Amino acid sequence: MAKIRIKLIKSTIGRKQDQIDTVKALGLKKLNSVVEHEDTPQIRGMINKISFMLDVEEI
């Protein structure tokens, strides 16, 4: 299965709690932090929920 690299490019300050929880669930902690995940429907759903805060690229 393909992998995707996710980078947090916008701060969680002032965001709704569900958006903050989604960022944490993806494993992102600080601004500009990067994680790699398998490309699954569950991960894609989380990415779509907060896509304006992320930079996503396929590996």
Image (cartoon, helix red, strand yellow):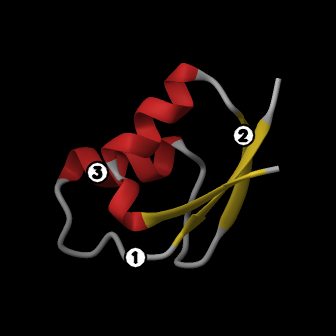
The residue tagged with tag 1: helix, strand or loop?
Answer: loop
Estimate how packed mark 3 is, as few (under 14), some (14 to 19) or many (20 or more) residues with alpha carbons within 10 Å: some
Mark drawn on residue 10: 1
Relative to residue 28, is residue 41 depicted above or below? above
Q: Are marks 2 and 3 in contact (CB under 8 Å)?
A: no
Q: Mark 2: which amino acid?
A: His
Single out the mark in the foreground, 2 or 3.
2
Vertical position of residue 10 compared to residue 38: above or below = below
Q: Position of residue 50 (x, y in %)?
A: 35, 52
- Residue 37: give its label: 2
Q: Earlier in the sequence, mark 1 or mark 2?
A: 1
Residue 42 in the image: above or below residue 22: above
Mark 2 to mark 3: distance in Å? 18 Å
Residue at 80% across, 32% down: 2
Q: CA distance from mark 3 to mark 1?
A: 12 Å
**Residue that appears at 33% across and 69% down:** 12
User: Foreground residue, 8 or 27?
Assistant: 8
> What kind of residue is marked 3?
Gln
Circle 1 residues within 10 Å: few <14, some 14–19, many ≥20: some
Residue at (32, 43) in percent of width and height: 49
User: If you read the primary sequence from the N terminus, does the residue marked by circle 2 or circle 3 appear first?
Assistant: 3
Where residue 30 sits, quadrant-wise, is bottom right
From the viewer's perspective, tell me whether residue 18 is left or right of residue 32.
left
- Tell me the residue that label 3 is attached to: 19
The secondary element bearing badge 3 is classed as helix
Seen from the viewer's position, the closer of residues 4 and 11 is 4
Residue type at mark 1: give it.
Lys
Counting from the top left corner in percent of width and height, residue 27 is at: 60, 50
Q: Position of residue 4 (x, y in %)?
A: 72, 45
Graded by Cα atoms within 10 Å as few (under 14), some (14 to 19) or many (20 or more), the crowding at tag 2 reads some
Q: Residue at x 18, y 73 (%)?
A: 14
